[in-house]
Amino acid sequence: HPEWLASNASAAKAFLKATAEGYAIASAEPAYAADALVRIAKRDHSFDIDPALAKGSAEFLADKFLDPDTKRWGRMDGAVWSEYVKWLWESGLLTTGMQSRHPDGGRTFSLDDLRAGNAGERIALESVPVVFTNDYLP
């Protein structure tokens, strides 16, 4: 959210720096990243992830995490995001409702509710703010 970024620039920069470091490690060491995902999901969330699936996914994604030219993570391209927001709007997915795994039926909704058009009021495309985090990247 633009206001949050403006008033929490230090937190945004620290978060994006840590995230970029994580993606750089995952890109360079996909097996290590997959192992960490499997271990931490189990330890912190009692959630089992198939180690072979995690490893295969990490290996497939390793060369896609970083920009091929700059070898950096996180740079946002305005044209790409404009097309994505347009697609979200055309698909009826830009609404005042928030998606939740535990919907309350009032302010938060399931993904199925969103897909069915039952998740808040549609947001006008021209009212969607342009927000890029490029200025906050390391």
Image: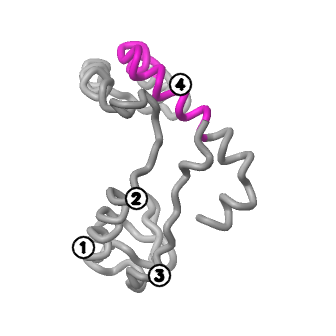
Coloration mode: one colour
Q: Which residue is mark 2?
A: 78
| Secondary-structure class at tag 1 | loop
Q: Which residue is mark 1?
A: 91
SS assignment for the magenta stretch, majority: helix
Distance from label 4 to label 3 (Cα)? 42 Å
Asked if residue 28 is positioned above or below residue 17 in the image, the reply reads: above
Please tell me which of labels 2 and 1 falls first in the chain.
2
| Secondary-structure class at tag 4 | helix
Q: Which residue is mark 4?
A: 43
| Secondary-structure class at tag 2 | helix
Label of residue 127 in the image:
3
Give the residue at x 41% y 77%. 95
| Secondary-structure class at tag 3 | helix
Q: Is residue 101 left or right of residue 91?
A: right
Around disc 1, counting alpha carbons within 10 Å, would you say few (fewer than 14), some (14 to 19), or many (20 or more)? few
Distance from label 2 to label 1 (Cα)? 20 Å
Distance from label 2 to label 4 (Cα)? 38 Å
In magenta, the rendered stretch is 16-36
Asked if residue 76 is positioned above or below residue 59 in the image, the reply reads: below
